[in-house]
Image: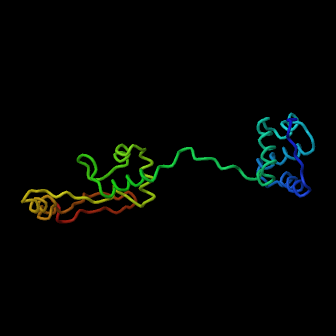
Amino acid sequence: MRKGIIVELSTADRARLEAVVADRNSPQKHVWRARIVLLTANGHGTALIMRQAGVSKVAVWRWQERFMTAGVEGLLRDKTRPSRIPPLGSEVTARVLTLTTTGDPPGETTHWTAAAMAKLVGISASSVQRIWRAHGLQPHRVRAFKLSNDPRFAEKLRASSGCTSTRRRMPSCSRSTRSPRSKRWIVPSRGCR
């Protein structure tokens, strides 16, 4: 056993740890942590605790130390770990929001894309999308229409939209065919030639 490891259990702590071990609904990580402390309190060595609990030597030492510093509550809660990805600064978020709402996109584009914004600001496209989603922005859905300087623009627009179309509708015809599910024949209408 390591030197300096002294685990003294009160009757309440022992009862609580034994209840965790006996409860079939306890998470397994809590069970083996409680088992480590109970075996340590009974005076067993590290090698026997490793075999009984099925964990490494470092894990045994970690949970012995955690119990000595934080008690039973320290065994039943996990330490919070920092996020793998550091959060973006508020100045980066503010820059993305300002460019999205007031700045014009680069080149001939009509709206911001996540890739274009990410390249300009120097962050990933998923970070840009996360910022937009958090603030309810959808710049790809903004309907921007660039008007022409042509004096005949309105006339050309009406002509191209089909408002003054002179096409005639052709009558539809059907051939004399038989429906696959029916024994009736479909007879063409008189207007067809």
Left or right: 67 in relation to 114: right
Query: What is the x, y in percent for residue 132?
Result: 41, 56
Residue at 79 percent of width and 44 percent of height: 65
Residue at 8 percent of width and 56 percent of height: 150
Residue at 12 percent of width and 62 percent of height: 158
Query: What is the x, y in percent for residue 12?
Result: 89, 58
In the picture, which quadrant includes the C terminus? bottom left
**Closest to the observer, 67 or 35:** 67
Residue at 35 percent of width and 59 percent of height: 179
What colour scheme governs how the chains and residues are painted in the rendered image of this protein? rainbow
Query: What is the x, y in percent for residue 72?
Result: 81, 53
**Closest to the observer, 150 or 33:** 33
Find residue 165 and report its image quarter: bottom left
**Closest to the observer, 60 or 152:** 60
**Closest to the observer, 51 or 119:** 119
Direction front: furthest residue: 4
Query: What is the x, y in percent for residue 157?
Result: 13, 60
In the picture, which quadrant includes the N terminus? top right
